[in-house]
Image (cartoon, helix red, strand yellow):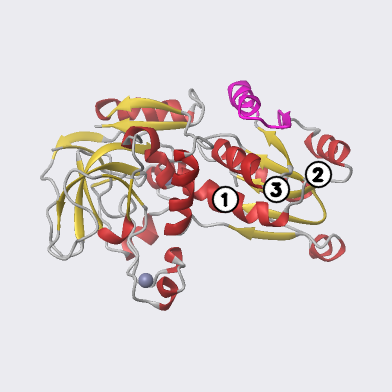
Amino acid sequence: MKAARLYEYDPAMNVELKIEDVRPPTIAAPDEVIVKVGAAGLCRTDLHIIEGVWKDIMDIEGGLLPYTMGHENAGWVEDVGSAVTSVKPGDAVICHPFNSCGICMSCRYGHDMYCDHGKFPGLGLDGGFAEYFKTNERSLIKLNTGITPLEVAPMADAGITAYRAAKKAAKLLNPGGYVLLLGIGGLGHIALQVLKHTSGARVIAVDREPAAQALARDLGADIVLDGGPDLIDEVKDLTGGGAHVAIDFVGEHGTENTCWKLLRQGGELIMVGYGGTVEVPTLELVANEIKIGGSLVGDFVELVELMEMNADGKVHMHQTEYKLANINQAITDFKDRKFTGRGVIVP
Ligand SMILES: [Zn+2]
Ligand SMILES: [Zn+2]
C-alpha cells in the first residue's frame, strides 16, 4: 500500500515525507482492527512531530523512524481480530485517536486519555497517512447514517480536542458572559460552533488571518478581532473587564502570555495549543483569582457526543482536501495558513 513516511526530524521543517510502497498492517492481537482509510486530518501536532518536539516521548514508546504519521482517521473496517464483535468489515467508522486498555482504573472511570497502557497511532506508531492503518476495537465509533469518513475524519482529534475544551468552558459560562477563542483554525472553528450551541455566552473570536475572521463570522461569532497590539485593551473595553473564559488554541509565539491577560477577575484560561511557556506572576493568580489549566484531546464519550452534534447538523468540519501524493504541499500550505479550517489527506 502507499504510505507517507517521515524519515528524519528537522526543527526548521525542511524535510519532506516520502510516499512509498509498504506492507499493509495485519491483525496480530484479538482486539485489533484494520481500517481502510477514507481520510486523515493534518494536525499541528504532525508539524511538531516533524520538528522533533515529540521525539523523546515517542522513543520511550518504541517509536523509531521511519514511520507513518496521521492520527485523525476515519474509514471503513477492512479486517477484524478474533475477539472483535462490535464492528464488521465494511462498517464506516471514526477512530478515537488513543487506543486505551479498558482495564486500568483511569479507563474504568472513563478517563481514556489517562489510560496507563494507551497507545497513540500516528505518534510513534504507524498512523493514517496511508491506505490502511491498525487500531483497536475499543477506539471505534460507527458513523451515523449518511455521514461519510471524508466529512468527519479530523473530528477524531481536532474536533474532539476542541469539543472537550468547549464543554469545559460551557460549564463555566452563563448567558451574557464572554468566552474568547484565540485561534480560529481547525480546532477553534469547531469550538466556536459547539459553544454557540451549548453555552448561551457571547463568543469573541480572535485571529490575525482575514479568511479565518470571515469563517468565524459565518459560524456566528458575536465579536471578531484581529489580535493586534491593542487586543488586551479592546477585550477589556468590549467585555467590561475581560473574558469569563478564554481558550488558547495556539499556545506559542506569544499567545500563551497574552491570553491570561484577557481574563476578568475570577476568569479561567484553558490551554489547548502548546509549544510556549506560560509565565504568570503569583500576584496575578492571587489578586485576580484567575485559573489556568490544560485540556488533553478528549474521552471516547466526548467523541460520541460530538458525532451526534455533527449528525444533527450543529457542528461541521470546514476543510480542504489533498490527495496522499500531495501531502507535502498540504504541509506547506498548513504552515503558510493557505487554507481555513482543517487540511485533510485522502488516500
Ligand atoms: Zn491532531
Ligand atoms: Zn486503561
Q: CA distance from mark 2 to mark 3?
A: 15 Å
Q: Nearer the viewer, residue 68 or 223?
A: 223
Q: Position of residue 13 (x, y in %)?
A: 40, 36
Q: Residue at x 60, y 49 (%)?
A: 166
Q: Would residue 4 be found to the left or right of residue 289 on screen? A: left
Which quadrant is home to the N terminus?
top left
Q: Nearer the viewer, residue 70 or 257?
A: 70
| Disc 3 residue crowd, few under 14, some 14–19, many 20+, Cα 10 Å | many
Q: Which mark is residue 103?
A: none
Identify the image quadrant of residue 145: top left
Q: Would residue 203 be found to the left or right of residue 294 on screen? A: right
**In the rendered image, the vertical position of residue 290 relative to residue 209, given as above or below:** below
Q: Residue at x 60, y 53 (%)?
A: 167
Q: Residue at x 63, y 46 (%)?
A: 198
Q: Which mark is residue 246?
A: 3
Task: Please tell me in which quarter of the rendered image ligand 2 is found.
Answer: bottom left
Q: Amino acid at mark 3?
A: Ala
Q: Which residue is mark 2?
A: 176
Q: Would residue 289 be found to the left or right of residue 333 on screen? A: right
Q: Residue at x 45, y 58 (%)?
A: 301
Q: CA distance from mark 2 to mark 1?
A: 24 Å
Q: Position of residue 80 (x, y in %)?
A: 15, 55
